[in-house]
Image (cartoon, grey):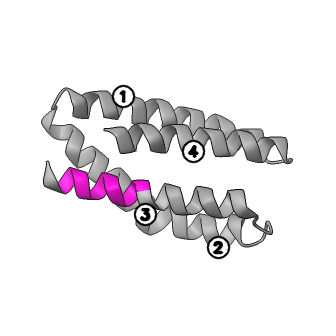
Amino acid sequence: MVALALNAVLGFGYRVYRLAKGGPLADVTGQAILGSLLAGLAVAVALEAGWARWAALAYALLFGVVVMPLWVLAVLIPLPPGRTDYAFTATYWLTLIAIAISSILL
């Protein structure tokens, strides 16, 4: 549950940071929507809804295996990245791993 919330906050904060550096507003909007969905999922996990762990696992696998690698290749590498970009990427991936492991162990 904590990893889901951290992932939502981290993603939104990073998108706002990138917006201040000239990034697209659509990224902030999309991350706000994703963050709202993740917050709802975190609440469902906290309430021990059986389906929520599978949804969290699907999210972690989809973003960890498909979305983040594409994002690294298409967005991060061409930036050029700085420390904040690397820190976000590493922390985001670590939270995805934590979400996946937690979902399996629940």
Q: Amino acid at mark 2?
A: Leu
Corner quadrant of residue 80 = bottom right
Give x and y (percent) for residue 68.
53, 63
Number of residue marks: 4
**Distance between the alpha carbons at the discs numbered 2 and 1:** 30 Å
Q: Amino acid at mark 4?
A: Gly
How crowded pointer 2 is (Cα within 10 Å; few <14, some 14-19, many 20+) is rated as: few
Q: Which residues are magenta?
A: 95-104
Q: Indicate the secondary structure of the residue bearing disc 1.
A: helix
- Residue at the image position 36 percent from the left and 60 percent from the top: 97
Q: CA distance from mark 3 to mark 4?
A: 14 Å
Q: Is residue 64 in the magenta section?
A: no
CB-based contact (under 8 Å), mark 2 and mark 3:
no
Q: Residue 42 in the image: x percent, y percent?
A: 33, 33
Q: Secondary structure at mark 2?
A: helix
Give the residue at the far right of this rendering. Answer: 22
- Indicate the secondary structure of the residue bearing disc 4: helix
Q: Quadrant of residue 105?
A: bottom left
The residue under label 4 is 11
- Tell which circle, 2 or 3, labels the residue nearer the N-terminal end: 3
Residue in view at x 47 percent, y 61 percent: 93
Residue denoted by label 3: 64
Q: Which mark is residue 40?
A: 1
Which residue, given by chain and number where applicable, does mark 2 sit on? Answer: 73
> CB under 8 Å between callouts 3 and 4?
no
